[in-house]
Amino acid sequence: MDVKYILPFLEALKGVLEQFGAADIKRGNMAKNELMHVDTDITAVVGMVGQVRGNIAYSMAEDTAKKIVSAMMMGMPVEELDAMGRSALGEFSNMVTGNASTLLSNSGVQVDITPPSIIFGKDVYFIISSVETLKIEMESSLGKIEVNIGLEI
C-alpha cells in the first residue's frame, strides 16, 4: 500500500489527539496482515468509499478509550463507557477519518466516509474485512491506539 494513503491517517490521528491535550505521540510497531482483524477491548470502524475503498479501524484498551472520552469532555472523569462514551468514541473516529479524508482530497484522492461502528469485545477476535491490512500502533500520553488500514486502491 502506497504511503500516500497511510500518512494522512497517522497525521490526522496525531492532530486530533493533540487537540485533546495528548502528548508524546509517536509511532510504534507496524505489521501487515492478510485480513483486518482486531482483538482489543474497543474498536471504532469507519468505512471509506470513492477512489479508495475499505475500512479504517481504531482499536484500543478500555482504559485508553476512557482517557480519550474524558479528554473530549474537558477532563470529566469517565468511570464506564456508557451511551455518551460510545458516542464520543464514534465522534473521535469521525474526526480522525474526516481529517484524513481532507488530506487525501488535498492530494487528489476523493473519498467519503461512512458512519462509525463501535465494537466492544474484550478478549474476542473480530474479523472486520478480508482486505490486506496495515496495522500501525500509535502511542501517546492517553494510551496506545492501533490503527488498522485496509484499503483497496
Image (spheres, helix red, strand yellow):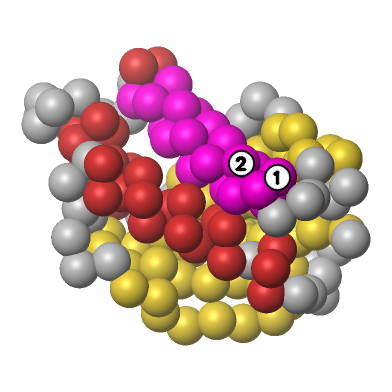
Q: Which residues are magenta?
A: 85-106
Magenta highlight: main SS: helix
Out of 113 and 87, give the one closest to the viewer: 113
Indicate yes or no whether the magenta region holds residue 29: no
Q: Quadrant of residue 133?
A: bottom right
Crowding around mark 2 (Cα neighbors within 10 Å: few <14, some 14 to 19, many 20+) is some
Q: Which mark is residue 144?
A: none
Q: Which residue is mark 1?
A: 105
Crowding around mark 1 (Cα neighbors within 10 Å: few <14, some 14 to 19, many 20+) is few
x and y percent of residue 103 in the render? 60, 49
Q: Quadrant of the N terminus?
A: bottom right
Q: Quadrant of residue 119?
A: top right
Q: Quadrant of residue 130?
A: bottom right
Vertical order, 121 against 147 (above or below): above
Look at the numbered disc 2 and give the secondary structure of its residue: helix
x and y percent of residue 54 in the render? 81, 50
Q: Quadrant of the C terminus?
A: bottom right
Q: Which residue is mark 2?
A: 102
| Dot 1 amino acid type | Ser
Indicate yes or no whether the magenta region holds residue 87: yes
Residue at the spot x=40%, y=75% of the render?
Answer: 27
x and y percent of residue 51 in the render? 88, 47
Look at the numbered disc 1 and give the secondary structure of its residue: helix
Out of 85 and 151, give the one closest to the viewer: 151
Residue at the spot x=78%, y=40% of the render?
Answer: 111
Residue at the spot x=37%, y=57% of the render?
Answer: 14
Using the rendered image of the protein, determine whether residue 66 is visible from the camera's viewpoint. no
Dots 1 and 2: beta carbons under 8 Å?
Answer: yes
Vertical order, 49 against 100 (above or below): above
Residue at the spot x=66%, y=48% of the render?
Answer: 106
